[in-house]
Image: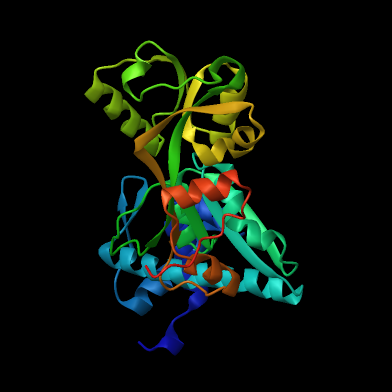
Amino acid sequence: MNLEQLNFHHLFYFWRVAKIGHLTRAAQEVHTSQSALSAQIKQLEERLGEPLFEREGKRLVLTATGRLAFSYAEDIFGLGQEMLGRLQGRSEGMIRLRVGSVSTLSRNYQENWIRPLLVDQSVVLTLESGLLEGLLERLLQHQLDVVLANETVPAESSRPLHCRFLGSQAIALVGPAGAWKDRTLRIPEDLDGVEIALPGPRHALRAQFDALCIAAGVKPRLRAEVDDMAMLRLIARDSGWLTVLPEVVVQDELRSGSLLKVGQLTEMQENFYAITTPNRHRIERLEALLAGASLSPAQATHGALNGESGDLKKTSS
């Protein structure tokens, strides 16, 4: 069979059934009958010469050929969706850039990273937040252009991803200025019994902090554990407890003096990554952001606390 004989309408129906995993629900989605949908997939199987599904009870399961066809269909129709989005943006004279960020990522960091785009009159931004796996799925389906994360992802042949290191951020122990003016703590030696708010168990920093305390034989008094950095910022500001978080999260409070840095966790840092697909559609504005070299922890802290844009500085690395 050559390409001219491949019916992409049938391939689209196969893709929807494989993606949804249910013939009846797929038929409802594409506004056709279950029997018509089944017949068109059957025609595709006859053209390809191999079955795409097999039944396990009431479930439809992809065969080895079906899995291969599905991986190509994902690219074909994902790129089709991307093309429509790009054409829509071009027809309006605009460039659309779709950015996902993990829910545990500092919103201050995200804003610093996209700041050059905020003054670009030709760019329309779509910003999404969620769990990493869900965002990566949308990235692979070409529904996002880049995902910002604070953890790396492994390279897999079945899931082609490119993970670019953007920089690091210093981690601090902060407290309210009224209680901690002119006071400092040794970290982690002085933390035993101290009331503290921490990033939640899903956050990349939490395991680092727990390991640090276990190694030192200290046990702070846990008062809150929070995944969302915006909420952790509010708790740091309003609770009166000490809080462990990246300095960029409370950059405004540190600048104004309402919060003070009580101690520096020199053995900890948060890393930032931009995740893309290798064969993505190239967008000039995104490529310019990705082309910046990584900041050192000192540079990242200095830039955040002095109100700099957060662009990644060019280096030789």
> Which quadrant is the C terminus positioned in?
bottom left
- Out of 42 and 123, give the one closest to the viewer: 123
- Out of 203 and 116, give the one closest to the viewer: 116
Instruction: Report which quarter residue 116 is drawn in.
Output: bottom right
Tell me: 5 left or right of 32. left
User: In this rendering, is residue 271 above or below 6?
Assistant: above
Q: Is residue 123 visible?
A: yes
Please report the residue visible at 58 percent of the width from the left and 35 percent of the height from the top. Answer: 250
Q: Is residue 133 visible?
A: no
User: In this rendering, is residue 270 above or below 206?
Assistant: below
Tell me: 294 left or right of 304. left
> Which quadrant is the N terminus positioned in?
bottom left
Tell me: 266 left or right of 283. left
What percent of the width, then of the height, locates residue 49? 30, 76
What percent of the width, then of the height, locates residue 53? 33, 60
Tell me: 74 left or right of 231. left
- Out of 66 and 222, give the one closest to the viewer: 222
Residue extending farthest to the top is 193
Tally of numbered tags: 0
User: In this rendering, is residue 111 above or below 7?
Assistant: above
Please report the residue visible at 47 percent of the width from the left and 33 percent of the height from the top. Answer: 245
What percent of the width, then of the height, locates residue 235? 57, 23
